[in-house]
């Protein structure tokens, strides 16, 4: 597997992980910790005493000698890459707990295929076929997601579905796509940017090569953003990746990377006009499946409304928090664009009829709904962001303090065990309530009381307002107040509706 310069190095105990197809990353840090990232299990730590600082220092110096680079206190960073391997070292003068190293495998092959995507629940059959039609119709596609979510692998798969006679040029700062090696008989040019050849200069040279497709490995700088816009505005078609937390937020994420004060409406208008499809990919460990899961969470269509000339977004596909899949049919704008490329999109490609929204009630969805668990709240995780319901995408509800009617206007509920300690304590009120045990028909004696209205209203952070002592009939209080035991928290309970993107990231 190892080639080029790395054939001259002795990887010792790391060799077995480099030769295992399931392993994608090897991380060494903190004076002896070894972490693996695999396709099936995600990230986990292994116990390997033979992989230590002494061994990693020898490996780093081997790499520096083979590369002809210096690695010491004056030059504390070392990068090296080949066709299938990328290495990064940080000297212990910078990494205070010992030398740090990350080895990433970038094999020259397509890991994904349709059967794998469907069997592993990466994407639904309808969305898969729709995306291939978008590639066939030369749609400009941006794939969003976190690091390690599988963005690059999805781009490689989509690129493999382009026509054999369509020229492809890849522009990368670190080589990961390797399409020129995967398809050696096709017209593919791989370009690598560096301190001599920038994105802009590479793109100018790229235009002179007359490509049909331009693949940018990742958009993470203002220069890359402008490279994308310039390439698609000149009539070329792009496939690229970007770090974003939703498909619908891709245009705004691109704008945030700009370093100039460019007019936001003009920029967003150009992106919505030229980028047709945005995809959001999520990677997480699924308790239900018992493995690391990657799947498409959102597919979004971008366009400019022909009547208002305003940028619009149509969320075609979205996996909901409860496991449901919501789908919307493409607009006429996308149909017309594909028709120019001789691609006919069915009137109802997702089988949802005339409804604005349709639900794909698959077996997977039913299984996810049946496995929903009762959220467990704690002081450290009151919203259950990391709790048992993370796998099925359902976030737990948490108590919420509300301002409004006094607490005696309605019967308060007793908070469950494990309630966050930041809730107001009503123990100072308890003696007053418990002492009121006279029969309802008995006339009470006047009791001057001063109740903390801040606590009674459930408000936090407001100055207490003293109440004028009043004489209130007991019969108006006793039926609506539950006796409070010492050290028991009483607070109004309401559900908290979590933002979709916050919970979805823990799905």
Image (spheres, grey):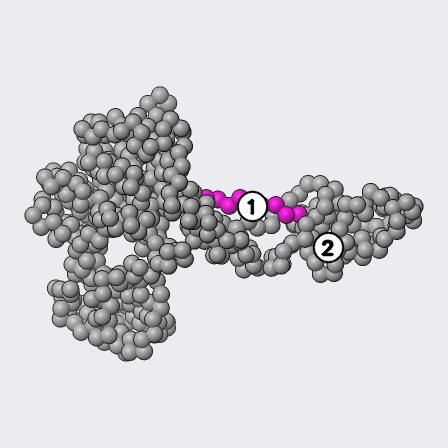
Callout 1 touching callout 2 (CB < 8 Å):
no
Q: Nearer the viewer, residue 84 or 69?
A: 84
Q: Nearer the viewer, residue 80 or 446?
A: 446
Residue 262 appearing in the image? no
The residue located at (31%, 59%) in the rendering is: 40
Residue 117 appearing in the image? yes
The residue located at (65%, 49%) in the rendering is: 460
Quarter where residue 476 is shown: top right
Please tell me whether residue 342 belongs to the stretch shown in magenta: no
Q: Earlier in the sequence, mark 1 or mark 2?
A: 2
Residue 419, given in percent of the width and then of the height, sits at: 61, 57
Instruction: Decide whether the magenta segment is chiefly helix, strand or loop.
Output: loop
* 290 on left or right of 4: right
Residue 495, given in percent of the width and then of the height, sits at: 58, 45
Number of other residues with Cα within 10 Å of mark 2, as a class: few under 14, some 14 to 19, many 20 or more: some
The residue that disc 2 covers is 426
In magenta, the rendered stretch is 492-501
The residue located at (30%, 51%) in the rendering is: 120
The residue that disc 1 covers is 496
* 56 on left or right of 5: right
Residue 57, given in percent of the width and then of the height, sits at: 26, 75
- The tally of labels here is 2
Number of other residues with Cα within 10 Å of mark 1, as a class: few under 14, some 14 to 19, many 20 or more: few
* 330 on left or right of 287: left
Outermost residue toward the left in this view: 185
The residue located at (43%, 49%) in the rendering is: 368
Above or below — where is 353 with respect to 179?
A: above
């Amino acid at each position: 597997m190892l080639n080029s310069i790395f054939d001259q190095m002795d990887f010792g105990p790391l060799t077995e992980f480099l030769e295992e197809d399931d392993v994608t990353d090897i991380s060494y840090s903190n004076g002896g910790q070894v972490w693996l990232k695999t396709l099936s299990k995600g990230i986990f730590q292994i116990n390997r005493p033979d992989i230590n600082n002494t061994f990693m220092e020898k490996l780093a110096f081997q790499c520096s000698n083979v590369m002809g680079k210096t690695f010491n206190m004056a030059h504390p960073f070392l990068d090296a890459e080949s066709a299938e391997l990328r290495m990064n070292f940080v000297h212990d003068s910078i990494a205070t707990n010992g030398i740090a190293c990350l080895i990433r495998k970038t094999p020259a092959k397509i890991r994904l295929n349709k059967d794998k995507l469907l069997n592993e629940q990466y994407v639904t059959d309808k969305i898969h076929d729709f995306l291939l039609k978008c590639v066939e119709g030369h749609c400009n596609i941006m794939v969003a997601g976190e690091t390690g979510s599988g963005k690059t692998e999805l781009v490689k798969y989509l690129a493999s579905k382009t026509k054999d006679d369509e020229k492809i040029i890849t522009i990368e700062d670190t080589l990961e796509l390797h399409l020129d090696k995967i398809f050696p008989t096709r017209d593919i040019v791989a370009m690598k940017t560096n301190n001599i050849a920038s994105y802009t200069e590479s793109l100018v040279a790229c235009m002179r090569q007359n490509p049909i497709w331009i693949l940018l490995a990742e958009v993470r700088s203002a220069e890359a953003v402008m490279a994308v816009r310039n390439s698609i505005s000149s009539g070329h078609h792009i496939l690229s990746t970007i770090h974003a937390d939703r498909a619908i937020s891709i245009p705004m994420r691109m704008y945030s990377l700009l370093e100039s004060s460019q007019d936001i409406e003009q920029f967003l208008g150009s992106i919505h006009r030229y980028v047709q499809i945005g995809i959001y990919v999520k990677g997480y460990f699924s308790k239900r499946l018992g493995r690391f899961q990657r799947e498409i969470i959102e597919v979004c269509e971008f366009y400019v409304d022909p009547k208002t000339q305003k940028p619009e977004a149509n969320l075609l596909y979205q996996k909901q928090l409860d496991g449901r899949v919501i789908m919307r049919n493409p607009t006429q704008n996308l149909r017309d664009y594909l028709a120019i490329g001789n691609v006919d999109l069915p009137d109802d490609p997702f089988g949802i009829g005339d409804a604005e929204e349709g639900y794909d009630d698959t077996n997977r969805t039913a299984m996810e709904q049946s496995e929903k668990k009762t959220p467990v709240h704690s002081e450290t995780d009151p919203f259950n962001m990391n709790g048992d319901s993370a796998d099925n995408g359902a976030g737990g509800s948490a108590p919420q303090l509300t301002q409004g009617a006094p607490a005696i206007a309605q019967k308060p509920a007793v908070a469950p065990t494990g309630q966050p300690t930041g809730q107001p304590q009503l123990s100072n009120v308890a003696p007053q309530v418990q002492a009121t045990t006279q029969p309802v028909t008995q006339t009470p004696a006047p009791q001057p009381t001063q109740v903390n209205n801040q606590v009674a209203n459930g408000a936090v952070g407001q100055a207490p307002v003293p109440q004028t002592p009043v004489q209130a009939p007991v019969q108006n209080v006793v039926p609506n107040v539950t006796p409070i035991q010492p050290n028991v928290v009483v607070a109004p309970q309401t559900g908290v509706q979590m933002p979709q993107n916050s919970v979805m990231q823990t799905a």
